[in-house]
Image (tube, rainbow, N blue to C red):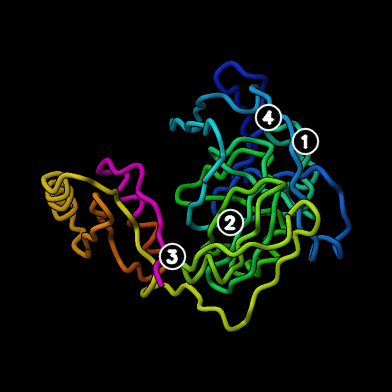
Amino acid sequence: MNHIRLNVHGLWPVVVLLATALLSGCSSVNRVNPGEAATTNAVPRFEPQPSRLNPSSYSVLGRTYHVLGSNDGYDAQGVASWYGPNFQSKPTSSGERYNMYAMTAAHKTLRIPSYVLVTNMENGKQVVVRVNDRGPFVSNRIIDLSYAAAKKIGMIGRGTAMVDVRSITPDSPIPTSQSIVSGAPTLPAAPVASAPAISAAASLPHAVWGQDVFIQVGAFGEMGHVISVQQRLAQAGITAVSVTPFGALNRVRVGPVASLADYDRLMDQLRTIGFDNAQMVVEQ
């Protein structure tokens, strides 16, 4: 692991924490003890989102990222990572210091500070975290979780997990893991600001590599564009491609993806041939 000091588009210098194997960047604001960290979700509240923390774009390691104008409606799936003791108390891009026992996270494009509901799609466990840092800048990871958050959703041992990341606000209803993992409609729950307590049901269906995991290359209205994409994928040796109608669009997907290693390989390959917006989707 190494520390790289960056100046993002003329902003005040920020510390971005890069991990060469798994992840980079995460922090906290509320200090809690390890016992509390294992069970207590972050409580969403409305906070200012200063422009110095949310430039329209910034560049890290030769790649440009575009910060969202609003987190409203954000819901994405991907692979989460985490880190802990080696980064304890180190500064993050928000100016706060990392606390491995707080429910926090790092994200490349969500506005900060903000709050998201993270669902481990492999076991149904959920956690609410406060996003207050930029990262991870290792390829193919959607979010970095603090040690406490990673422990709560059961991903400490493996280091990664398939997750759904959904933006929430203090007045948002919390979708249950049933509605996320199974694709059912979102169910209303107690307001997260008062009691963001979520528990997973052991009987929930779980996402499985080689069965439920796909990479969506894009969604296109014109069939000619779809055929062109299929040809580009075939030329790159990617043949497990499906086309699914979705309203007026046709979704082009690769998969099912057999493993995390295959996911990383395919995502890197897709970026190499120009599909920078490819993303994980889980279907059950």
- Ranked by sequence position, the earlier of labels 4 and 3 is 4
Around disc 2, counting alpha carbons within 10 Å, would you say few (fewer than 14), some (14 to 19), or many (20 or more)? many
Task: List x then y, in percent, for residue 91.
Answer: 75, 36
Mark 2 and mark 4 lie on one chain; the one further toward the N terminus is 4
Residue 187 found in image quarter: bottom right
Which residue, given by chain and number where applicable, does mark 3 sit on?
Answer: 260
Label 3: few (<14), some or many (≥20) within 10 Å?
some
Magenta highlight range? 267-284
Nearer to us of marks 1 and 4 is: 4
Q: Mark 2 or mark 1, which has the lower sequence index?
A: 2
The residue that label 2 is drawn on is 81
Which disc, if any, is residue 49? 4
For the point 36% across and 75% down, which residue is it? 211
Find the distance from the CA under tag 4 to the CA under tag 3. 34 Å
Disc 1/disc 4 C-alpha distance (Å): 14 Å
Q: CA distance from mark 2 to mark 1?
A: 20 Å
State which tag comes first along the sequence, 1 or 3.
1
Q: Earlier in the sequence, mark 3 or mark 2?
A: 2
Q: Is residue 60 on the magenta stretch?
A: no
Q: Quadrant of residue 275?
A: top left
Say which amino acid is labelled 3: Leu
